[in-house]
Image: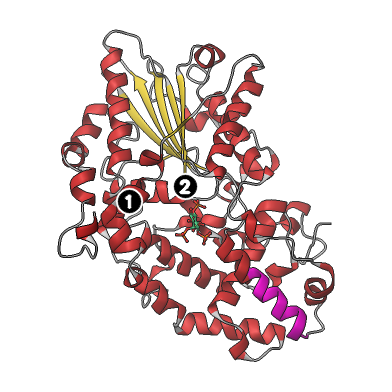
Amino acid sequence: RVYSYLAGDAPVTARRIPSIAAYFGTKGRYEEVNPHLIDNILAVNKLLLKPPSADCTAVHLTAIVRHGTRFPTKKNVKKMMELHKLIKAEASSPERWLEDIKNKWAMWYTEDMDGQIVDKGRDDHKHLAVRLANYFPSLLSEENLRNNRVKFITSSKHRCVESVIAFQQGLFTHHGIKDVDFSHEVKDDLMRFFDHCRRFVEDVENNRTALMEVDLFKSSAEMKRVQEKIADRLDVPYSRITTDSVEAAFFLCAYEFAIKSENSPWCELIDETDALVLEYKNDLKQYWKRGYGHDINRKSSCTLFHDIFRRLSEAVNELRTGHVTEVATVQVGHAETLLPLLTLMGFFKDETPLTSSNFPEQERRTFRTSHTVPYAANLVFVLYKCPEGPRLQLLLNEKPLALPNISDPVPLYDIVQEHYRDLLQGCNFQTECELKASTCSKCSEL
Ligand SMILES: O=P(O)(O)O[C@H]1[C@H](OP(=O)(O)O)[C@@H](OP(=O)(O)O)[C@H](O)[C@@H](O)[C@H]1OP(=O)(O)O
């Protein structure tokens, strides 16, 4: 049953898409950053991704991919259950959508779902695999798959392992391959580097003050207004609607849409003004926990950065012999794998840091996870062999991504190496992640 709370004459697809779907941040569908996929999930825009020139050929790609659509984590299921219980017991309003929440919509989320992948998430990866195989037929080819020249690496988390298997299924189905075994390598030091960086764990993950700006924004006038508006819509006292209640309503709309493609009655609790505030709160969390907020966030991704460029340089060196052994590497991780890496490479950096007090000025911020890291987000490094030398193109979510301060959309690999020289020669994970005696509370135990 598809809920539709828009005007009956709206186009069918529009009726199914909540008006706030563009603001779900890291809980947004991949289709919202690539709307042409809504009507044709396998659509590819070859013009968009033609080689830099007719005499260039793609010889290697490395893809860093976030897992597909997943269930809410345990902590958010608890918040969602709390809100649903409150509404059933205390909310009263003549609105039909509230009647639907109270009498038709049943709580089906359980704590043990805890972030596991859903079927839509498997499809996200199957379809992405087919589109990438269509973009790069000479790399993700049947012959290369059969000759083990395509490598698969994943985080150990269920949602990532299931995603990489679905990605492989997409490729094998695309090529009609039935007699090849799937294989992938679990490498958490690469895909969950943040767990292995002691300074990140100490200074950010386990440090209550690290996300102070998020906490301050939760007490801001903007957030208070959202809480009051929701309380008014439910006709309950302001004191009953907390910031957790607001987040739960937003996430219920986001998950019902991402998992079941439903414009559920939960979406009626939040209007676009509210959604912009909640999108900013989530971006503040990602900025201070995974982005520019703390230096160690981006430095913890040094291992992954070096691994990517080691692989690219290996392919460049092999070009001299004419034969690249590893033509593609697909690496599946998390939003917190992609965001620190994008930050380390200088992408999506705003002049003014995101803080709890400058939400109005940040309306057009470039650090916006709704546009960069939805489910199945992917950062692809494509190496081309050209007469003038190897060139590198970056794609984010199947769209060209210009390197910061480099005008050439597909620069010479030498130029890219020069641009990142300091990181390539430095950015030592051990050095960056070791605990400084002054900040380490349990150094003696290490
Ligand atoms: O708010 P939740 O619990 O969903 O946060 C998750 C992260 O989800 P995200 O904030 O990125 O939407 C989850 O990242 P994912 O890419 O794996 O979905 C992360 O793995 C999980 O630990 C939660 O992050 P947190 O920083 O521990 O809140």
Dot 2 corresponds to which residue?
334
Residue appearing at x 65%, y 75% in the figure: 82
Q: Of circles 2 and 1, which is in front? A: 2
Farthest front residue in view: 445
Q: Quadrant of the C terminus?
A: bottom left
Crowdedness near tag 2: few (<14), some (14–19) or many (≥20) residues, C-alpha within 10 Å: many
Q: How is the image coloured?
A: secondary structure
> Which numbered disc flags the more N-terminal residue, 2 or 1?
2
Q: Give, as a single range, the part of the protein colored magenta.
A: 80-92
Q: Residue at x 67, y 70 (%)?
A: 81
Give the SS element for disc 1: helix
**Residue appearing at x 33%, y 48% in the figure:** 196
Q: Residue, x 21% and y 51% (percent of image)?
A: 434
Q: Is mark 2 within 8 Å of ligand 1?
A: yes
Tell me residue 364's x, y (percent).
42, 64
Q: CA distance from mark 2 to mark 1?
A: 14 Å
Amino acid found under the numbered disc labelled 2? His
Q: Amino acid at mark 1?
A: Thr
Per the image, the residue denoted by label 1 is 343
